Amino acid sequence: MTAYTDSLGFNKGTAAFPAANVPVAKLEVELDFAAIAAARAAAGAAALAATDSLDVIPLPAGTTVLMVGADVTTAEGAVATMDVGDGSGATTYMSNVNLNAVAASGATVAAPVFYGSADKIMVTIDSNDTDAAVVRVWAIVADCN
């Protein structure tokens, strides 16, 4: 397993809320795995494989995550799944998201998760190489600073 913190092929943004004085926000990133694969190859970086993870949404210290989701907008074309988690666990938010079916699969967090120090939302490829799916990963967050 390799944990990638780069953003080759996608824009994960910065660890900041989108506007001043906006206490609740929706942070999101689109993961186009074909574009990610092409960007990684062009940069001479290793291709993504099963059990690899990508940091996709930075969370600043003092953030409470209220809800997380992963919307598959383009199917992989083969069996593939991913988990959505954070620095303390690969499946904190979602486990075995089916990347081979177009679907919205929002997940309500049972109890809001507060991050006293900076962390991230990450995805982990569970099975097979993922190189065609397009997934929008999002989080509803509250700035508690």
Image: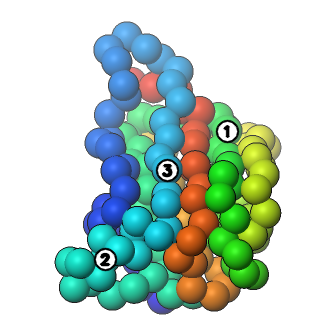
Q: Are marks 3 and 1 in contact (CB under 8 Å)?
A: no
Which disc is residue 40 wearing?
2
Residue at label 1? 67
Looking at the rendered image, the quarter that the C terminus falls into is top left
Q: Earlier in the sequence, mark 3 or mark 1?
A: 3
Q: Nearer the viewer, mark 3 or mark 1?
A: 3
Question: Residue at 57% of width from left, 78% of height from top?
Answer: 130
Q: Nearer the viewer, residue 83 or 109?
A: 83
At label 3, the amino acid type is Glu
Answer above or below: position of 95 versus 80.
above
Mark 2 / mark 3, whichever is N-terminal = 3
Query: Is there any visible trace of residue 87 in the rendered image?
Result: no
Q: Nearer the viewer, residue 127 or 61?
A: 127
Task: Give the farthest residue toward the top.
Answer: 21
Element on which disc 2 rests: helix
Q: CA distance from mark 1 to mark 2?
A: 30 Å
The residue to which callout 3 is attached is 30
Q: Position of residue 44 (x, y in %)?
A: 22, 85
Q: Is residue 122 left or right of residue 36?
A: right
Q: CA distance from mark 3 to mark 1?
A: 17 Å
Of labels 1 and 2, the one closer to you: 2
Residue at 67%, 38% in the rendered image: 67
Residue at (43, 14) in percent of width and height: 22
Name the residue type under label 1.
Met
**Number of residue marks:** 3
Element at label 3: strand
Look at the picture and state if 57 lies above or below 33.
Answer: above
Q: Which is more N-terminal, label 2 or label 1?
A: 2
